[in-house]
């Protein structure tokens, strides 16, 4: 699941002229993203870490293994599709629960209706 800030970051990154070829560094670009998303740099940095963990973005590393850039991965480029799929998968998994709730609500309404009906 993506929180509000993560969605804003993904949307911002997808507005680049060529999102699949755009790289962002952790110095200047992080501040720019923070400004565009109306957040602070450290919150954006934390959200970027989360997006990397979730597979939406990837890091570029120096020879010493230090991350210095990030960019959109396939999942980040097509985040709306993956988000929609996540929701549909959840519904497919939970449909028996939804049906049980619907049956319970109908039963409750029938019970209330029969209690309020005047005899006669």
Image (cartoon, grey):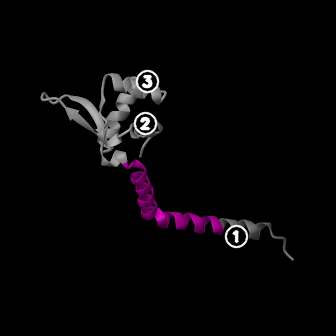
In the shown orientation, is residue 50 left or right of residue 99?
Answer: left
Mark 1 or 2, nearer chain start = 2
Q: Nearer the viewer, residue 112 or 27?
A: 27
Local SS, label 2: helix
Q: Quadrant of residue 100?
A: bottom right
Q: Looking at the image, is mark 1 or mark 3 nearer the viewer?
A: 3
Q: What secondary structure do most residues of the magenta stretch adopt?
A: helix
Tell whether label 3 touches label 1 (CB within 8 Å): no
Return the residue at label 2: 12
Local SS, label 3: loop
Mark 1 or 3, nearer chain start = 3
Q: Nearer the viewer, residue 26 or 114?
A: 26
Return the residue at label 3: 40
Q: Residues within 10 Å of mark 3 (few under 14, many from 20)?
A: some
How far apart are the alpha carbons under marks 1 and 2?
A: 50 Å
Residue 25 — which label?
A: none
In the shown orientation, is residue 6 left or right of residue 119?
Answer: left
User: Which span of residues is magenta-colored?
Assistant: 78-107
How far apart are the alpha carbons under marks 1 and 3?
A: 53 Å
Local SS, label 1: helix
Residue 95 image offset from top left, x and y in percent: 48, 65
Q: Looking at the image, is mark 1 or mark 2 nearer the viewer?
A: 2
Mark 2 or 3, nearer chain start = 2
């Amino acid at each position: 699941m993506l929180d509000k800030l993560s969605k804003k970051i993904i949307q911002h990154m997808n507005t680049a002229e060529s999102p699949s070829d755009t790289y962002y560094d952790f110095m200047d670009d992080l501040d720019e993203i923070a400004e565009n998303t109306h957040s602070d740099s450290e919150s954006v940095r934390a959200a970027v870490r989360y997006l990397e963990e979730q597979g939406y973005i990837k890091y570029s590393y120096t020879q010493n293994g230090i991350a210095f850039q990030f960019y959109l991965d396939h999942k980040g480029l097509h985040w709306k599709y993956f988000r929609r799929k996540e929701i549909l998968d959840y519904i497919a998994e939970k449909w028996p629960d939804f049906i049980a709730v619907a049956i319970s609500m109908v039963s409750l309404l029938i019970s209330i209706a029969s209690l309020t009906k005047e005899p006669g």
